Amino acid sequence: MPDILASLSPQDALVAVMVAVSAADEDVPTSELVAINRIVDHMPLFADYDIDRLARVSRSVFSLFEEEDGLEALFGLIRDALPERLFETAYALACDVAAADGTIRQTELRLLEEIRGELAIDRLHAVAIEWGARVRHLTL
């Protein structure tokens, strides 16, 4: 397991969730990378975040995806690093990244479903979060 994952901060865990969703289909569109950077640059949760950690966390997530039980390990690390009050935030950020390129692929939908389950997101809350992400990323 990559060293940085041994000591995830809550912000690192949020970054890891976003990167995981973006990498779910083994293609990381530029629009999703831009979305992750925009979120980290502008959300109050990331005000004191060391931006240099973003690349290291991303590489660590990619490394975990290459391992047999990497996704389960990643979920465990995320749950351990995130306070429960940020579980819905993590899901919302994941939805925003998935919707950023205008298309949510089947692999992203499956990963979002797994995130919902792993973070015990209430189904009604999940629908509201998903709807919000969808309408924020509509195009003309």
Image (cartoon, rainbow, N blue to C red):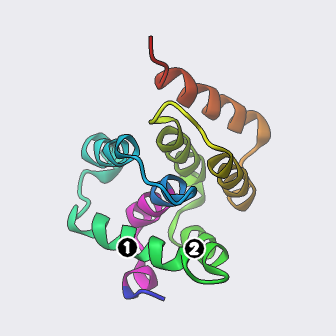
In the rendered image, the vertical position of residue 11 relative to residue 132, given as above or below: below
In the rendered image, the vertical position of residue 25 relative to residue 78, given as above or below: above
Residue at 66% x, 83% y is 68
2 vs 1, front mark: 1
Q: Amino acid at mark 2?
A: Leu
Q: Is residue 12 magenta?
A: yes
Residue at 78% x, 40% y is 123
Quarter of the image for residue 67 reads bottom right
Q: Earlier in the sequence, mark 2 or mark 1?
A: 1
> Which quarter of the rendering shows the C terminus?
top left
Disc 2 vs disc 1: Cβ atoms closer than 8 Å? no
Q: Tell me which segment is drawn in magenta.
A: 4-17
For the residues labelled 2 and 1, the Cα–Cα distance comes to: 13 Å
Residue 60 relative to residue 118: left or right = left
Q: Residue 36, image x and y in percent?
A: 36, 48
Residue at 26% x, 60% y is 49
User: Element under label 1?
Assistant: helix
Instruction: Identify the residue under disc 2.
Output: 74
User: Element under label 2?
Assistant: helix
Instruction: Identify the residue under disc 1.
Output: 59
Residue 51 relative to residue 67: left or right = left
Q: Residue 111, image x and y in percent?
A: 66, 55
